Image (cartoon, rainbow, N blue to C red):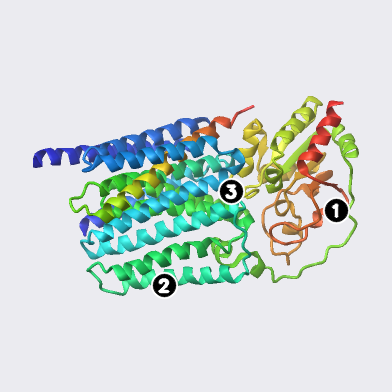
Amino acid sequence: METYILLGFVLVLSIYLGLELISKVPSTLHTPLMSGANAISGIALVGALMLAVGDQFGQLQEVLAFLAVTFASINVFGGYLVTNRMLKMFKKK
Amino acid sequence: MSILIENLSTLQNVIYIISSMLFITGIKMLGKEDTAVRGNFLSALAMFIAVSITLVNVVNPLIIIIGISVGAILGSVIALKVKMTSIPEMVALFNGFGGLATFFIAWSEYSTTPENYFQYILIMLTTFIGGVTFTGSIVAYGKLSERLTIKKTSLITKLFTTIFYVSLFYLIYSAFFTDIFEPNFDFYLILIILTLLGGIGFVLPIGGGDMPVVISLLNSFSGIAAAFAGLMLLNNVLIVAGSLVGASGLILTIIMAKAMNRSIGNILFVGYAASSSGSKSEETGEVKPINVSDAFLILENASSVLIVPGYGMAVAQAQHVVRELGELLEANGTEVKYGIHPVAGRMPGHMNVLLAEANVPYDVLVEPDDVNPTMDSVDVTVVIGANDVVNPSATEEPGSPIYGMPIIEVHNSRTVFVLKRSMSSGFAGVQNPLFFKENTRMLFGDAKESIGGLVSEFKE
């Protein structure tokens, strides 16, 4: 119970921090920010890996962990690469 | 052995803290033009170290390595091959995959028996948000790539929308109003099915011009889903990174909704059709067409030109000829700027990406607030495939459904050229009085061809 409260605290503070950090983003960066943030949401990969750590590891879990790892990896690799490709195009006069 | 495990777990947590710091710095730098590339790199580095340290104690590395390899190859190929015009649907697709991953994580946690009531609620919530993000993003992908065309009023749309509400109700009921501590698969499977179908219903009724809002919101959801998965797995870095994504998606959603002067609720659950109860004045008047050579003569003598692109420019793939025209005008001594409305196109910043692809420097791109006050000193505005974002009804006609929406006030410039295929109305279904204004000239035809014609006139 205490752990959840503590982690809930981290969650709320992180959201506030995020709102503060990104509130004045120029419109040029709207798409790269979205796609870069999208790549970060691939952090689910760490969660997917944690599934493969537990001791109760049945067949269903094995399949689910494999699928979660695969899709999260697509998100991570694709997200970062496309963001980088896009940002490289932006030039100043 | 237990000391080793304890040390490893401590080391992992320290690395997670470092990773979180890098994510925070990375996303901060991603919000500024000069530092964005480095910001993205830092965030990738954060991801790399967090994943690496988690890999250390994976029990069965084989399936994990296969999974990561497959994902890495697929993701990289898609990211490097995709055309810049297809970016909106690709972001939607990647977003959906992130949602799907958290959905599978929640499912797997459920099948290993939730330890307590909190965890049970978190599993239900993560399943729901992850699932809705997945199928919602897939529908958004279909709509953006124009593979999926279903009318808002069709029976299928209504059916799926109803399922969405049912799934929401089922989630609340199953998470908060039952005392099931033992995993019950019949019960959970119903939630899974409802959630996946509900996600379709969440996005299906939302029209093309509202896509920038939906895609930002789905982006936010994928972050929230990851953050909830972090609570569920008691993992800090998932919570921090997921929350940052949730916040950035939320900010974009709010910016988009403000740019349309509508509430998020109105966009998601009402749409334009229902809100347009106000008087619809039948605009009549004469439309004054112009041909390419006359338009060229006017442009040649202009000292300042503002180009206002919209979704039509993306459809016509006209960004490269537009840049060419801009350069020729500048060589001719004309000051050229591009007026970009935040919701022009199908995703936040859509026009900026297309123009960047065509090598237009970003510092000649201006926002409505920068350009409206001095609009009367602009000689010519060239509207390319934009409609609602330049509709003067938004400032002049209180009964109009788009009244109050901030627009680029091109009608205040000396001359307006509107490049358009035909006289059809924009996404909002509102007639545009701009076309009938005294200072407006219509240049009918495909935008790419019309601009190409202007370019060759300049070259002669």
Residue type at numbered disc 2: Phe
The Cα atoms of the two marked residues, 2 and 1, are separated by 50 Å
Residue topped by disc 2: B169
Q: Quadrant of residue B8?
A: top left
Horizontally, residue A92 falls left or right of residue B446, namely: left
Residue type at numbered disc 1: Lys
The answer to whether B132 is drawn above or below residue B53 in the figure is below
Is residue B193 in view from this perspective?
A: yes
The answer to whether B110 is drawn above or below residue B456 in the figure is below
| Mark 3 in CB contact with mark 2 (< 8 angstroms) | no
Is residue B32 in view from this perspective?
A: no
Q: Quadrant of residue B267?
A: bottom right
Q: Earlier in the sequence, mark 2 or mark 1?
A: 2
Residue topped by disc 1: B437
Q: Quadrant of the C terminus of chain B?
A: top right
Pick the residue in front: B351 or B111.
Answer: B111
Task: Determine the residue positioned at 61% across, 44% down.
Answer: B350
Secondary structure at numbered mark 3: loop
Pick the residue in front: B284 or B395.
Answer: B284
Q: Earlier in the sequence, mark 3 or mark 1?
A: 3
| Mark 2 in CB contact with mark 1 (< 8 angstroms) | no
Horizontally, residue B366 falls left or right of residue B254, namely: right
Q: Nearer the viewer, mark 3 or mark 1?
A: 3
Chain on which label 1 sits: B
The answer to whether B371 is drawn above or below residue B253 in the figure is above
Task: Determine the residue positioned at 50% across, 48% down.
Answer: B93
Q: Nearer the viewer, mark 2 or mark 1?
A: 2
Q: How many marks?
A: 3
Chain on which label 2 sits: B
Residue topped by disc 3: B347
**Residue A18 at what x, y percent from top left?**
42, 46
